Image (cartoon, rainbow, N blue to C red):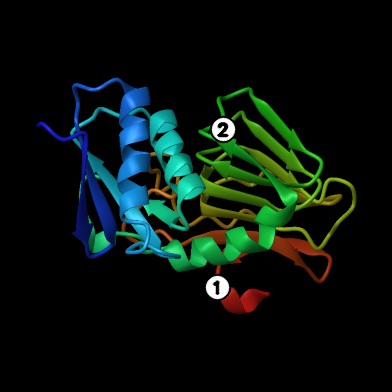
Amino acid sequence: MTQAVVIKSKSYGIHLVLNPEMEFHDLTQAVIAKFKEAGDFFKNAQIGISFEGYDLTMEQEYELIAAIESYTSVNIICIMEDNEIQQACLLAETESYIRNKVAKNAIFHYGSLKPGEELHSDTGLVILGDVPAGARAIAGGSILIFGALDGFAQAGAYGDSAAYIAALSIDTGQLQIANILLITQENGGRGKHKSGFLRRKKPEGQTPQIAHVRDGHVIMEPYTKDLF
């Protein structure tokens, strides 16, 4: 491959073919230059993205996405894995809606937590990865997890019972909002999937879940936009 980066249009957004022989820093600069050239074409676009050619780590994917969004008006709403077009960005609208409700007053954590790890935020918390069994996520506001929640999560830690916990899958009874614990565990199956930034490889039957307070109890149910 002679070019540093080639941009291809796909039904879900764009596909980047990257030169595997380049240093990552130089490759990032080439991606920025390429998107600057095509700036008018992608103006204010909300798109999915996929990669080919370069063996990117999850952190490098995040860096490329951040670079693209910093130098253009493009909004990357999901990463598409393995060019699986059928499931591309299937949950993007739901995820984008929830994210917009949280992101203005939240910190972002990139990557999955490790068992035994504890993550705190005085405001909202967005986790781009999984919260496995043994890990704890605690926030003063709402918690949004772009991955599986199997560990402990507490939203509204300072008494905000209007806070909520949303995840692509929830398979734990260890939920708390303000000082109210989840009483009944209502699992829909594990539905594990690889963690990462809005990854679109959706296991069949998986539905985003949300836990919130209703009538003085924490309940968990499939997420729909008409809940709030």
Q: Is residue 29 above or below residue 37?
A: above
The type of residue carrying mark 2 is Ala
Q: Is residue 134 above or below residue 92?
A: above
The residue at 67%/33% (across/down) is 136
Q: Is residue 22 left or right of residue 105?
A: left
Is 62 in front, or is 139? Answer: 62
The residue at 78%/63% (across/down) is 217
Q: Position of residue 177 (x, y in %)?
A: 78, 52
Q: Secondary structure at mark 1?
A: loop
Is 205 in front, or is 123? Answer: 123
The residue at 62%/53% (across/down) is 185
Q: Is residue 135 left or right of residue 10?
A: right
Mark number, residue 28: none
Q: Residues within 10 Å of mark 1 (few under 14, many from 20)?
A: few
The residue at 69%/32% (across/down) is 119
Mark number, residue 224: 1
Q: Earlier in the sequence, mark 1 or mark 2?
A: 2
Q: Is residue 45 left or right of residue 103?
A: left
Indicate the quadrant where residue 102 lies.
Answer: bottom right
The type of residue carrying mark 1 is Thr
Whole-number angstrom distance, CA of label 1 to CA of label 2: 26 Å
Residue 201 in sight from this viewpoint: no
Q: Position of residue 71 (x, y in %)?
A: 47, 47
Q: Position of residue 4 (x, y in %)?
A: 21, 33
* Residue picked out by circle 2: 133
| Image quarter in which the C terminus is found | bottom right
Q: Secondary structure at mark 2?
A: loop
Q: Residue furthest right?
A: 159
